[in-house]
Image (spheres, grey):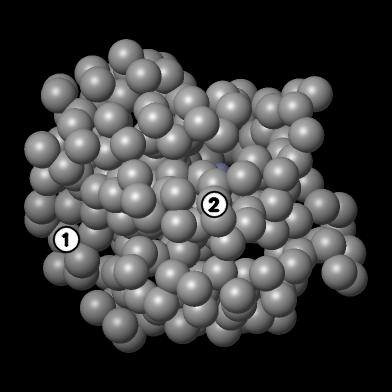
Amino acid sequence: MLPSYNIEQLTALVRAAESKRSPLIIQLFPSTLKQLPTLAHAAAQYVKTATVPLSLHIDHAQDVEHIRQIIRDLPVDSVMVDMSHYDEAENLEKTRILAKECHDRGIAVEAESGRINGGEEGIADTGELEALFTTPEDVESFLAAHIDILAPSIGNIHGDYGPQGPAEGQLHFDRLEAISKQINGRVHIALHGTNDFPEAIMKRCIKSGTAKLNVNKLLLEVWNQHLRENAASMGLVRLMDEGMDVLQKETERWMDVCGSSGRA
Ligand SMILES: [Zn+2]
């Protein structure tokens, strides 16, 4: 599940998926839909014409009316209905209502159980709100709201862990494994907050039951770095071309690490 904030990144991600024969979920933030209203249509065109299975997902949609507008007007395949800034009862009730509205349009729904702390580009920071780890009761409550994908809170954070990645014990793999066992294939598990992940941690999360891996900085940092280093000296066309190349290569590398290469 790979994010893009512009057409060049989108293009590079799709190129990587096709060259690695990997399925791919293209992710756009609601803020990106507002900033670049045509980007979702460009992504949907790739979903339609690519030679590998792609889908278009809207990540962290936190505004009820915006969600309704998105599912009514845009060619999306899935939406993360993120009501985690409400208390649990209200989160569940809003999730249940919106899941029904999405399903009526053939759109799949992801929700966050517990509360994953922090913020990243495109996501409102949880600020003073306390992180809440996902419990077995949360899992059943969210499944009862008829979601399709569950994003648990297991010590993962939105934002940076630091250059070494998560500290020993910061991610509760035992909790993740228990959640996976409890879910028993009824929905998929999404892992948010993968900035700074070393390869081994990513593999461990997959082994513990995660199917959908949300990456952001983990991939896009090479793009940012390329711009920082070359923006002053390179013409725009070459800057974009080479940026797409470095992002495609980095994406291909992670597709190999995650084992999605060759699966399309
Ligand atoms: Zn997230």
Could you tell me residue 170's position as x and y percent?
A: 83, 62
> What amino acid type should be assigned to the residue bearing mark 2?
Asp
Could you tell me residue 260's position as x and y percent?
A: 40, 78
Residue closer to the observer: 68 or 264: 68
Q: Quadrant of ligand 1?
A: top right
Mark 1 beta carbon near ligand 1 (under 8 Å): no
Mark sitting on residue 138: 2
- Identity of the residue drawn at 55% across and 47% down: 113
Graded by Cα atoms within 10 Å as few (under 14), some (14 to 19) or many (20 or more), the crowding at tag 1 reads: some
The local secondary structure at tag 1 comes to loop
> What amino acid type should be assigned to the residue bearing mark 1?
Ala
Q: Residue 172 lies in what quarter of the image?
A: bottom right
Judging by the rendered image, the residue that carries numbered circle 1 is 50
Q: Which of marks 1 and 2 precedes in the sequence?
A: 1
The local secondary structure at tag 2 comes to helix
Quadrant assignment for the C terminus: bottom left
Graded by Cα atoms within 10 Å as few (under 14), some (14 to 19) or many (20 or more), the crowding at tag 2 reads: some
Q: Is residue 223 left or right of residue 126?
A: left
For the question of whether residue 143 can be seen, the reply is yes
Quadrant assignment for the N terminus: bottom left
For the question of whether residue 29 can be seen, the reply is no
Do residues under tags 2 and 1 come within 8 Å of each other at their CB atoms? no
Residue closer to the observer: 156 or 95: 95
